[in-house]
């Protein structure tokens, strides 16, 4: 078998141009697929990481109070029990944030725009300051109690500049209409969809507008040491919280293994009958479950490309090896005469195709890694419209080694299938006929 | 009983709808250590008979016995095994494996099947054969770096490496100039004497026929002469004997 493999390997060098073209086609296909896999691999992590910084956390705890008439009030009035549970859980916390949020209409010189306003403690949210790059204005302006930071697009729609005063119309948590006044402290670069959707004001003024008392808030964000460990940390924290406070059930998989979309789960829980105060714990991954669907779609597209490309390459391999059989017919006859069994001839063809496929696939992966490395060196900037899929302004890739190995295995298997027929034909050759054949 | 026995051997080829007889009932016996020439013009059936003795082709009827063992009922795998164990082949076009060097080409048959011989013994034997065929300085060269005569020497060493009972050579000198051809035949004769290996070769070169101990002449698929030279009259070298 070693001899057969050795000859098969050396046979690849006999028609260098042909080997190069066929191997090159395999390499190209694998390179494309690897690039998509690499992009998809980093996509969900980058999106989750960026969202977690904008939303200030990997794990979120929000409070709900049941009012009369089954209405629900979103508030955390006293977080002592929550703080205690976080401490007792022993999870690695980088920092914790408190936020309130409302949906309202911003009004400036007759122009109206509906948006979400997050009330934040800007002196504590250092990560948000890093992610949100200001185009105009300054973070220092945010020390004014009624300051607001708008995204570039929001500001343009309203036609406001830094220093302009705008009206805000919203409802308190109890459903009463309320109006306030905000001063534009800064205009941030447009950071994707989320940047356009959310404006930032101070937590204290936000609470005032929505009718919460000072010290109260709606959502606690916990940024753990690493996004990867967030789900595990959430499990531990949830168990700890459940010991001291009443908790909503967490996202669960159904019998088919499918996860209920986060928003749907929240809607369903709202309809349930309960009383008092309850807390909901969710992770960024659960909230962004739709991002996972994009990753699945990208991976599916990569798999389809892989199969289509390789069906075409398979035809090339099958034709080439049929030609190879005729080119080496006397050689096959000689080997058979010397005592090589049919299986040996077949194995020689299969080995040759296998080496070609593995060589091409490895070259394709190496090429893809080089391209990924080169692309990831480009700095698109924190103000890029594609900010949400970038990692610190760079497009990043992550290729799970198992996926790369799986791609090589698929190519190898398909090549073996493609060459099976010519290999079988070569093995079945009558040695006398093969030796008689004049090339 | 001879080392090879052919009994009423027939071989027909199908050419479209027509069946063409190539061998029409041939019987003869070959003794161990024979240096036998199957001579005849083109199309007389030399190569067909050689292929049937070499178990690469099956007769349409009749029987080929190798060391008294009938071969017509053997499976492809058994025939292949028997070829490997008992037969060596030398071809007109040398048929070396182009990706292997001289040493590896000679080694190749030893790597097929199972062997109880140690690596060192194998290497010594290959080196001995390379020296014997005069290619000591060429052992690492690929076939395309050798002359026709050198390639045929490699083929001879390769045919002998498994120490076969019989070496079959199909027109071994046809692609060589006459001087090189004579050297090749001398070499085969020397090995025949030293190792008592039976050599069966097909040729239509009269000079080469002269050196054979046993001559089978064919015409139109039939034996026209089966002449065994008396011991006293056997040639030591090319041109040294008489027919």
Image: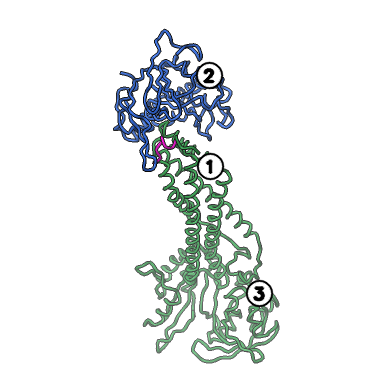
Majority secondary structure of magenta residues: helix
Which element carries disc 3, helix, strand or loop? loop
- Quadrant assignment, res A244: bottom left
Indicate the position of residue A95 as horizontal and vertical percent values: 56, 68
Q: Which chain is blue?
A: B
Looking at this view, is B126 or B235 the one in front? B235
Residue that label 2 marks: B182
Looking at this view, is A305 or B163 the one in front? B163
**Nearest to viewer (mark 2 / mark 1):** 2
Give the label on residue A189, or none: 3
Q: Chain of mark 2?
A: B
**Residue A430 falls within the magenta-colored stretch:** yes
Indicate the position of residue A393 as horizontal and vertical percent values: 63, 65
Q: Is residue A258 above or below residue B116?
A: below
User: Is residue A399 something one can see in this rendering?
Assistant: yes
Mark 1 residue crowding within 10 angstroms, few (<14) / some (14–19) / many (20+): some
Looking at this view, is A187 or B180 the one in front? B180
Q: Which residue is drawn at the image coordinates 36% and 17% (left, top)?
A: B31
Which element carries disc 2, helix, strand or loop? helix
Residue that label 1 marks: A12
C-alpha distance separating marks 2 and 3 = 91 Å
In the rendered image of the structure, the colour used to display chain A is green
Write the start and end of the magenta stretch as one range. A428-435
**Nearest to viewer (mark 3 / mark 1):** 1
Which element carries disc 1, helix, strand or loop? loop
């Amino acid at each position: 078998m070693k001899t057969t493999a050795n000859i098969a390997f050396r046979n690849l060098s006999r028609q260098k141009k042909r080997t190069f073209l066929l191997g090159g086609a395999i390499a190209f296909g694998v390179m494309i697929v690897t690039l998509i896999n690499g992009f998809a691999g980093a996509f969900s992590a980058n999106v989750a990481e960026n969202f977690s910084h904008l939303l200030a956390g990997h794990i979120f705890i929000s409070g709900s109070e049941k009012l009369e008439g089954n209405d629900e009030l979103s508030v955390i009035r006293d977080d002592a029990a929550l703080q205690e549970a976080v401490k007792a859980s022993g999870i690695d916390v980088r920092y914790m944030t408190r936020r309130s949020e409302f949906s309202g209409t911003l009004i400036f010189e007759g122009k109206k725009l509906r948006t979400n306003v997050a009330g934040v403690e800007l002196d504590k949210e250092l990560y948000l300051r890093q992610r949100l790059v200001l185009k105009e204005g300054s973070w220092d302006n945010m020390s004014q109690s009624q300051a607001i930071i708008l995204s570039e697009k929001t500001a343009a729609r309203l036609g406001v500049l830094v220093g302009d005063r705008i009206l805000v119309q919203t409802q308190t948590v109890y459903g009463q209409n309320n109006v306030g006044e905000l001063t534009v402290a800064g205009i941030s670069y447009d950071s994707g969809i989320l940047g356009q959707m959310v404006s930032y004001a101070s937590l204290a003024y936000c609470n005032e507008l929505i009718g919460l008392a000072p010290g109260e808030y709606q959502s606690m964000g916990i940024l753990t040491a690493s996004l990867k460990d967030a789900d595990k940390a959430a499990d531990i924290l949830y168990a700890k919280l459940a010991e001291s406070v009443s908790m909503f059930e967490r996202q669960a998989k159904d019998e088919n293994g499918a996860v209920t979309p986060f928003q749907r789960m929240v809607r369903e829980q709202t309809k349930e009958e309960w009383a008092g105060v309850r807390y909901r714990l969710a992770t960024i991954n659960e909230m962004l479950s739709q991002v996972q669907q994009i990753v699945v779609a990208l991976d599916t597209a990569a798999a389809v490309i892989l199969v289509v490309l390789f069906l075409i390459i398979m035809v090339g391999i099958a034709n080439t090896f049929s030609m190879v059989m005729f080119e080496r017919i006397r050689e096959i006859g000689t080997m058979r005469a010397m005592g090589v069994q049919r299986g040996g001839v077949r194995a020689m063809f299969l080995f040759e195709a296998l080496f070609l496929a593995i060589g091409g696939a490895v070259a394709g992966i190496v090429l893809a890694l080089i391209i990924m490395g080169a692309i990831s060196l480009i700095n698109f900037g924190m103000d890029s419209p594609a900010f949400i899929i970038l990692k610190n302004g760079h497009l990043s890739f992550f290729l799970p080694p198992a996926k790369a190995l799986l791609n090589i295995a698929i190519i190898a298997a398909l090549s073996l299938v493609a060459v099976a027929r010519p290999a079988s034909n070569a093995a079945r050759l009558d040695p006398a006929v093969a030796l008689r054949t004049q090339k | 009983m001879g080392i090879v026995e052919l009994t009423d051997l027939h071989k027909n080829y199908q050419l479209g709808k027509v069946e063409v007889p190539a061998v029409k009932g041939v019987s003869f016996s070959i003794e161990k250590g024979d240096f036998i020439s199957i001579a005849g013009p083109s199309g007389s059936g030399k190569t067909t008979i050689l292929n049937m003795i070499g178990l690469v082709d099956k007769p349409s009827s009749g029987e080929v016995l190798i060391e008294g063992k009938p071969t017509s009922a053997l499976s492809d795998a058994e025939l292949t095994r028997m070829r490997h164990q008992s037969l060596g082949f030398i071809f007109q076009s040398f048929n070396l494996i182009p990706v292997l060097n001289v040493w590896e080409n000679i080694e190749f048959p030893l790597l097929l099947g199972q062997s109880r011989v140690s690596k060192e013994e194998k290497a010594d034997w290959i080196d001995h054969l390379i020296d014997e065929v005069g290619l000591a300085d060429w052992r690492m060269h690929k076939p395309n770096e050798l002359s026709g005569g050198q390639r045929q020497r490699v083929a001879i060493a390769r045919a002998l490496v498994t120490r076969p009972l019989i070496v079959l050579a199909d027109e071994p000198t046809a692609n060589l100039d006459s001087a090189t051809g004579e050297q090749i035949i001398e070499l085969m004769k020397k090995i025949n004497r030293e190792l008592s290996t039976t050599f069966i070769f097909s040729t239509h070169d009269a000079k080469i026929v002269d050196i054979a101990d046993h001559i089978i002449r064919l015409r139109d698929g039939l034996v026209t002469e089966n002449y065994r030279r008396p011991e006293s009259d056997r040639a030591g070298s090319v041109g040294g004997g008489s027919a």
